[in-house]
Amino acid sequence: MKNQPAKPSQAPGTSPPAAVVEWVPLFEAQKRIYPKTTTGTYTSTRWLFVWLTQLLYYGLPWLEWSGRQAVLFDLGARRFYTFGFVLYPQDFIYLTGLLVASALLLFFITAIAGRLWCGYTCPQTVYSSIFMYIERKVEGDRNKRIRLDNAPTDVSKISRKALKHALWLLFSIWTGITFVGYFYEIRKLVPDLFTNHVAGWSLFWVVFYSFATYGNAGFLREQVCKYMCPYARFQSAMFDKDTLIVSYDAVRGEPRGGRSKGADAKSNALGSCIDCSVCMQVCPTGIDIRNGLQYECIGCGVCVDACNSVMDKMEYPRGLIRYTTENALKGKFNQKELIARILRPRVLIYASILGSLLVVLGVSLSLRTPFKVDVVRDRAVISRIAQGGLIENVFRLQLMNATEQTKKISISASGPPALRIASATQETLLPTESKWMVVSVHAEPGSAPAGAHKFMFQIDDTEGAFKLSESAVFIFPR
Ligand code: SF4
Ligand code: SF4
């Protein structure tokens, strides 16, 4: 129930009036945001990151390496190609390490300068910026868009809206195709899509990712940052009073108020804020930074650029809104000390954990043997008597060549019981090939007591590039 109106006084001898109940919806209707364009250092930096991230995203699947796609997650063949590295599911640990390193990098950056990731490189922010750019080109800047949305529906309005949505959809479909192109060779995917030869799942993901882009960047935009993104909720745990965040300098800005250009703020008993609301109009999440740090703020710095241009026009010093820390705003540190405080214990701890993890990852990747073997016992034949009375155990070896060269290998078996391989002992694997090999191992009866005996398979590159050992168990029957 909302604030109820004051109860009317009850006349003597009459029954009391019925209680007034007003229903309030649990979900607040969202006001549409029409961000205004601005220019400045932070706005240019944001666009630089849009270009860099998108050139990488759209360009990478088209790069070739050794006659194949340079970056490809081939789920069917269970291989992940990244330039010269060919990773198998057994190398999943490296991917895990990379994800942990990315999370630590995010903590590290957040501790230094807040939500830089959100403001400059998060796909939600980047795609929203691109979609807003298209919107501006078709419908005009803030005021024109507001006027268009409030105007009655006519041919001009419908054609502008239709053009905007068509461009959004084209861009989204290309984004969806590119996403699937990381899993399905993009040079095959594009013609396969147009000749209707693409598999159902690939088509599903193209459509799904396209609509996710269209919906998130075209309609949901800041709602994703405000209500769906978990990072917005827990990032404050990584902030402290020395984290650089976009802040309004209330000491300098208040009391705010309008005035003519060149008017002396002090003689009018006013602060530097002219209450023009430009900082709110440019904000992609529609907040007023003058109300202090809010979880909706993605740290994009666009309001800094906008306010600086207002300060320039008023001939006031820049920086009424700026990247600064809570401690600096309170006057505890000057600009020099503020920079020195960046290397504080929290940041150094994140940096040392991140650095150690990257070193471990780098060393283990450089020492990684580019050939893998998995031994699987043939479950159909545990142990049997073969021709000549010998005891036979059968194994299946999965051989995985993670190099760009053809590899010839030889296989032998060694253990406390004398063992001999009775099947083929040589195999050839083409570059990045994986194949299964059935290996039959023989032992003399009575050469070891009944039961399980551990032994080793030895896999040697015939050119001497590597030697691998894999343990297995030979069973002597009772
Ligand atoms: S842009 Fe600057 S001057 Fe204008 S309202 Fe915002 S803080 Fe005040
Ligand atoms: S308040 Fe400023 S920094 Fe925060 S989201 Fe809005 S424009 Fe970006």
Image: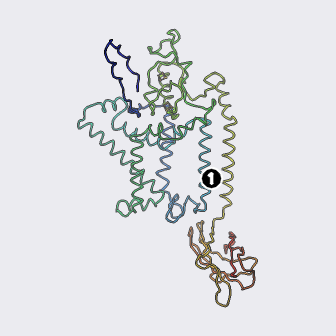
Q: Quadrant of residue 379?
A: bottom right
Side of 459 relative to 118 (left or right): right
150 up-or-down from 271: above or below = below
Of all residues shown, which one is farthest toward the front? Answer: 13
Q: Which residue is mark 1?
A: 97
- Give residue 37's position: percent from left, percent from top: 42, 32
Q: Quadrant of residue 234?
A: top right
432 up-or-down from 147: above or below = below
**Residue 86 shows in the view:** no
Q: Locate the N terminus by quadrant.
A: top left
270 up-or-down from 356: above or below = above
> In front: 6, or 345?
6
State the scheme by which the image is colored: rainbow
Q: Residue at x 68, y 81 (%)?
A: 477
394 up-or-down from 242: above or below = below
How dense is the environment of label 1, judged by Cα within 10 Å: few (below 14), some, or many (20 and up)?
Answer: some
Under mark 1, the amino acid is Gly
Q: Residue at x 47, y 38 (%)?
A: 227
- Give residue 427's position: percent from left, percent from top: 61, 77
Disc 1 element: helix
Of all residues shown, which one is farthest toward the left? Answer: 155
Side of 425 relative to 182 (left or right): right
Q: Residue at x 31, y 15 (%)?
A: 14
Q: Is the CB of mark 1 within 8 Å of ligand 2?
A: no
Side of 398 relative to 216 (left or right): right
> In front: 385, or 345?
385
Q: Locate the C terminus by quadrant.
A: bottom right
**Residue 349 shows in the view:** yes
Of all residues shown, which one is farthest toward the top? Answer: 267
Q: Residue at x 53, y 37 (%)?
A: 233
- Give residue 279's position: percent from left, percent from top: 46, 26
Q: Quadrant of residue 110?
A: top right
